Amino acid sequence: MKYNALPKKVLYLWLLRGALGAIPTLAAFLTAVFLCEGAARLAVALFGGAALLISLFFMLGLPALRFFRYRYAYDEKRISVLRGVIFRQSILIPLYQIQDLHKTEGPLMMLLGLAGVNLSTAGSAFSLATLEREAADRMISELESLAAVRFEENRNEAL
Amino acid sequence: MKRFDKGYLFYHLLTDLFLSVFFVLAFLDELFLVGEEGEVLGIQSEAILPCCLVMGAVYLLLCGYRALYLYRSGYALGENEILCRRGAIFSKRSHLEYRRANAINKKQNLFQRLFGIAVLTVDSGATTQAATAEITVVEKSATVDVLMREIKARQRGEAAPSCEEEKQSEEAVRFTEKEGLYAFSKTKKLLYALVNLASAAFYTLIFALLAVGGVVLGASVLSRAGVSSEVLAVTAIVAVIVLLAVALLTFLTALLQSFIGYYGFCVRKSDEEIEISYGLFVKSVNTFRLDRIKGVRITEGLIERFFGLCAIRLEVVGYGFEGSGENQDNTAGLGLLVPLCERREAEALLSRLLPEFVPDAPTVKPPRLAPFLCWGQLFLAIFSLLPTGFAVGLMAIFGASSRATLFVFLLGLLVYVVIAAFFAVSRILCFKNGGLAVKGGRMTVYGGGFQKSTVVLNKRSFVALERRATPLQQRAGIFSAVLHFYTNAATNEVKALHLSEKDVSLLEDELTV
């Protein structure tokens, strides 16, 4: 199986989401520093600053690292996703277990011309990849036909 | 559509009366004349009428609701499906094809038995809130039995058999307290209660010791004169009282559960299904189709392991372990195949009941360094010591006394040491208990730390495999495999911790090709 990376637009999407989350956090921190006085201001600046830096790392730094580690692949028998920075995961889903495939588009995704491909199995739901809209459509239709073939093969094997 | 039995209304008229009385108890203060020192002087006659009015209004409201529910609810057994309509204000109409029904259960509590009714639930396993069955029917107990037989017959595409035919067709694997292949005997019930008592006592003792340690530490740091004997004595007495109270409560609960909850525990098997029935006050009959049983879980707690005991549960589609809505009765026993048995007899029991789920001996064991190559300790240190550092920093900024700061620091450190020790022991036990076997159509996953578990899964119910590792583990070639499988319980995954890269790859090939 040949693993594919995500398109660069996905990185922009994740950073944009992170930035949207960072703005209220930053505003809350600055308001707290401004409202407090004396020792309380020092405490808020020190501990709040440390918490803010950690939050910023999670909102902006981690998505970037996650983007560079994310890989996905599929062939006629299974789908595989590699992801995670600190806790690394490799997910393998047999095609015949696919129940349904979903394409999702939020406002930010629509803005960047992206779409998410998710699938449900009988037991769990998995997010496969966020791709450019046309690529997502292509992936869904390919997976659909591969899954149909695999399902038929599996049924014949069972018989 | 046939309406539910009228017993439903009478049953609720009685239970709602209790509910209304409890509601009125909230106004007791208003009802009694209380003296200055809290003594009851008498009843305020002018408060009796409002109290009765409130109780009456609540009762009438509930009665109206129940009557409307009975009037608007009903069921019908169609050619291919069961139809059910439920609800007083918001009506819900459900259709369930016979072939999709996974679990057919009958439940009857003490009051329902008084009115001769029972609740029949039929579930397809489509709901994630497992116990919210799609079909719920309240009928006379005998009618529920007939309905159960009829539904099962229609699942097989036959006409409903008579009681005699039903009895003859059942395979003779039957366990009752008297017949005794598996007997949840009085001795075992007492043992079950004692094991629960020992488990609760063990964990309470650890927490009590930790609390005593904290108090002693605080007393020695904060008091210049060292630990006062009075503080020590009071702490020890409080710890012992808490320990005894928790132990007694656990023992009584377990005793009631085993003697009343699991009264007449009986497992029956026919060609197509397993039936588990139990209960004195709440009588349950749970039926599971064999082809919908996805796995078996054998659990052994720390104390059970000392005595070589275990419990066996079914992993099954259609019903999890928590109830809600109309079925909010206790469903904790659902899927429980054997509440307590000797570990060495578990295989023999399974080979009679579910031969395809007898565990295989582990062929793969965790690599040697596995328990020590994890980031858990680091994260544990960060999350345990960060609040301590935060508190100490704040105390320093706000000029708290050095003794108080030292106390907080030492207390944080103590908590970290205890948690770290617990975690380390758990990891070592995980390593010791871990293992995997893939044989024929099934997988056996051994795992768990303090609570050892052996899960036997049917390969057909496997839906995805997840390989997890931290960068450190990845470099050492150690992975955890998470097997996702199909049930509608809260967690539908089993973790096989610490496998070598070669073993995970073999597993991937085995399961996905």
Image (cartoon, grey):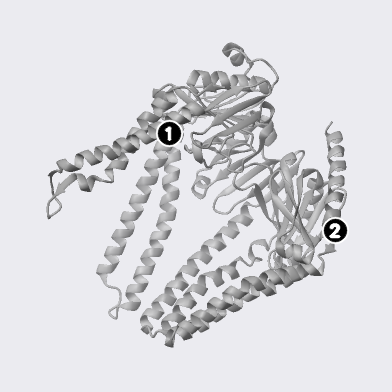
Compared with residue A96, is residue B175 higher up or lower down, i.e. above or below?
Answer: above
Regarding residue B239, the answer to whether it shows in the image is yes
Q: Residues within 10 Å of mark 2 (few under 14, many from 20)?
A: few
Considering the image in quadrants, where does the N terminus of chain B appear?
A: top right
Residue B164, how many percent across, how many down?
58, 11
Marked residue chain, label 1: B
Could you tell me which secondary element the residue under label 2 belongs to?
Answer: helix
The verdict on a common chain for dots 2 and 1 is no
Regarding residue B332, the answer to whether it shows in the image is no
User: Which residue is at 35% across, 29% downward?
Assistant: B14
Instruction: Decide which of B339, A55 is in the foreground and name it.
Output: A55
Q: Residues within 10 Å of mark 1 (few under 14, many from 20)?
A: some
User: Which residue is at 43% across, 21% downward?
Assistant: B116
B103 on left or right of A129? left
Choose mark 2 or mark 1, whichever is in front: 1
Query: Does the residue at mark 2 contact the one at mark 1 (Cβ under 8 Å)?
Result: no
Residue B11, how many percent across, how many down?
40, 27
Instruction: Decide which of B357, B132 is in the foreground and name it.
Output: B132
Residue that lies at the very extreme toward the bottom in this rendered image? A38
Residue B150, how many percent across, how many down?
61, 19
Instruction: Name the residue type under label 1.
Output: Tyr
Marked residue chain, label 2: A
Task: Give the label on residue B65, or none.
Answer: 1
Q: Label 2 to label 1, Cα distance in Å?
A: 54 Å
Instruction: Decide which of B508, B87 is in the foreground and name it.
Output: B87
Instruction: Decide which of B216, A117 is in the foreground and name it.
Output: A117
Judging by the rendered image, the residue that carries numbered circle 2 is A134
Could you tell me which secondary element the residue under label 1 belongs to?
Answer: helix
Compared with residue B168, is residue A33 higher up or lower down, i.e. above or below?
Answer: below
